[in-house]
């Protein structure tokens, strides 16, 4: 199939609403994958891409890998799949990207589809393997690069193609227009102000102390999360706002390997910062949103310092700060009494170093906190990161991978898992649905509101 042939699997990224609707009409991607099997590899374009983008770091990593296998036990998918040698991180990257480079791009469709299956079903880009490699090789970074190469040729899972297209059309991972978003903010303000008189969800307020950015799934499916955030900012006395545009922090484009759309996404957030001039940004309870906009985003946007335009905090950081400074005070009588554990997200714990803030929060809100083993930056991926949660083609592999997190939770004896990350929250929800181990799971916000002391100057109508 040439670049001009086919309806769905062409190499042109989705750039219009009509094209997006065309793909959505596929109802699951069956036709998409069928056409992919006939998609010719554009070898000259592939060679040119490798020449222009495969830089010294990745070349050094590929060449310095000793195939020692010390990365094996670092990978939850290797453990969950009965230590299958084909799940060893070094094997996975050498048999895909390594082979692609050794062949200098002279590969066929079957090989590219194999690379796609490995890149999206056998690695969540959690970066845990890098901690245990004696050569400091990060397979997650290399798989992120491989995803970009595959995307350029049209070999990308259907849901990732859709998600990337959403970002290009809506600057959000879901079909939420600016009007939809502003209406949702106003709706949640109206729904909440009776219980919390004086509460506001300010839109496009200039010079605020905080600009709050969210995960589009909250606006689409969990608008009460926005209301919960507003309540906690209200109780803390924060001067805050949300932008009417540039409010979406997440990046399915990053999961898809769509480098151009990833740049478009982060620039929309940075544009909101430039327009409203807040002092700081707070990112909702989402790990990859923080990674996409705060950790990776500055490089996509061409900011040489590697830092976002303003100081940026993951929600865990803001909560810890509010508790430490007394902006939020916990009623000791309302602390969590039952055994509780905490899911360390790869993206804001391992890759951003926020383990201490998370533990401080737990020390304030839980009487029986139980650590997973291992924990902090050594914790295993939830099992659904890197886009794996949402890809139907790889659901069986994802469910197998959930066994590691299942066993970690069971060993704690906890019945409540606190998970301030959307991918982790989803994976643990699905874990319970698949394995029925009798647990509950929650973000921080709904747990905090009932136990925070209401300041005397604020009114709370409990009924």
Image (spheres, helix red, strand yellow):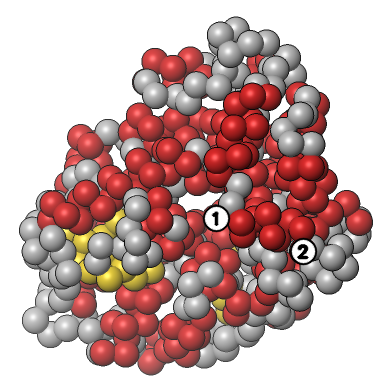
Q: Residue at x 60, y 7 (%)?
A: 5
Quarter-wise, where is residue 38 in the image?
A: top right
Quarter-wise, where is residue 153 in the image?
A: top right
Q: Secondary structure at mark 2?
A: helix
Q: Residue furthest top?
A: 5
Q: Secondary structure at mark 1?
A: helix
**What number of labels is visible?**
2
Q: Nearer the viewer, residue 461 or 38?
A: 38
Residue 197 can be seen, yes or no = no
Q: Is residue 2 left or right of residue 422?
A: right
| Residue on which disc 2 sits | 64
Q: Earlier in the sequence, mark 2 or mark 1?
A: 2
Determine whether 232 is above or below 88 in the image.
Answer: below
Q: Is residue 358 left or right of residue 439?
A: left
Q: Is residue 224 left or right of residue 82?
A: left
Q: Residue at x 69, y 17 (%)?
A: 39
Which quadrant, please, contains the N terminus?
Answer: top right
Spot occupied by residue 215 in the image (x, y as percentages of width and height):
39, 51
Which quadrant, please, contains the C terminus?
Answer: bottom left
Q: Residue at x 57, y 60 (%)?
A: 424
Determine whether 430 is above or below 324 in the image.
Answer: above
Residue 11 can be seen, yes or no = yes
| Tag shown at residue 238 | none
Spot occupied by residue 312 in the image (x, y as percentages of width and height):
31, 68
Measured in 3D between alpha carbons, the distance from the residue under mark 2 to the one under mark 1, in whole angstroms, is: 33 Å
Q: Is residue 305 left or right of residue 362?
A: left
Determine whether 29 is above or below 437 in the image.
Answer: above
Q: Residue at x 47, y 41 (%)?
A: 259
Spot occupied by residue 257 in the image (x, y as percentages of width and height):
55, 41
Front position among marks 2 and 1: 2
| Residue on which disc 1 sits | 423
Dot 2 surroundings within 10 Å: few (below 14), some, or many (20 or more)?
A: few
């Amino acid at each position: 199939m040439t670049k001009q042939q086919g309806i769905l699997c062409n190499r042109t990224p989705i750039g219009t609403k009509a094209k997006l609707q065309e793909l959505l009409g596929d109802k699951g991607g069956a036709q998409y994958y069928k056409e992919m099997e006939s998609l010719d590899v554009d070898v000259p374009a592939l060679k040119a891409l490798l020449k222009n983008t495969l830089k010294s770091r990745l070349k050094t990593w590929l060449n310095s890998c000793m195939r020692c296998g010390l990365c094996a036990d670092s990978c939850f998918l290797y453990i969950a799949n009965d230590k299958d040698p084909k799940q060893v991180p070094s094997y996975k990257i050498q048999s895909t990207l390594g082979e692609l480079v050794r062949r200098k791009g002279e590969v066929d469709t079957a090989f590219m589809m194999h690379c796609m299956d490995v890149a999206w079903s056998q690695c969540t880009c959690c970066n845990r393997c890098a901690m245990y490699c004696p050569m400091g090789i990060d397979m997650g970074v290399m798989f992120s690069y491989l995803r970009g190469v595959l995307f350029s040729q049209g070999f990308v899972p259907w849901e990732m193609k859709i998600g990337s297209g959403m970002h290009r059309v809506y600057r959000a991972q879901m079909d939420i227009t600016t009007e939809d978003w502003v209406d949702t903010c106003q709706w949640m303000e109206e729904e909440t102000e009776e219980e919390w008189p004086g509460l506001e969800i300010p839109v496009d307020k200039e010079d605020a102390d905080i600009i709050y950015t969210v995960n589009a799934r909250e606006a689409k499916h969990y608008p009460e999360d926005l209301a919960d955030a507003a309540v906690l900012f209200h109780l803390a006395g924060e001067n805050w706002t949300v932008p009417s545009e540039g409010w979406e922090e997440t990046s399915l484009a990053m999961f898809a390997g769509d480098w151009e759309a990833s740049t478009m996404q982060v620039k929309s957030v940075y544009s909101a910062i430039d327009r409203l001039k807040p002092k700081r940004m707070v990112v909702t309870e989402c790990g990859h949103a923080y990674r996409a906009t705060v950790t990776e985003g500055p490089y996509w946007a061409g900011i040489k310092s590697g830092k976002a335009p303003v100081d940026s905090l993951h929600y865990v950081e803001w909560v810890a700060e509010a508790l430490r400074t007394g902006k939020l005070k916990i009623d000791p009588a309302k602390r969590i009494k039952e055994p509780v554990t905490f899911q360390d997200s790869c993206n804001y714990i391992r890759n951003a170093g926020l383990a201490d803030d998370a533990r401080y929060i737990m020390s304030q809100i839980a009487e029986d906190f139980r650590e997973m083993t291992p924990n902090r930056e050594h914790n295993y991926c939830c099992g659904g990161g890197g886009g794996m949660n949402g890809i139907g083609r790889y659901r069986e592999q994802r469910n197998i991978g959930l066994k590691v997190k299942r066993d970690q939770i069971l060993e704690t004896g906890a019945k409540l898992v606190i998970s301030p990350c959307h991918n982790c929250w989803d994976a643990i929800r699905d874990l319970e649905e698949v394995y029925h181990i009798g647990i509950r799971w929650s973000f921080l916000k709904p747990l905090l509101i009932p136990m925070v002391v209401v300041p005397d100057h604020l009114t709370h109508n409990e009924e």
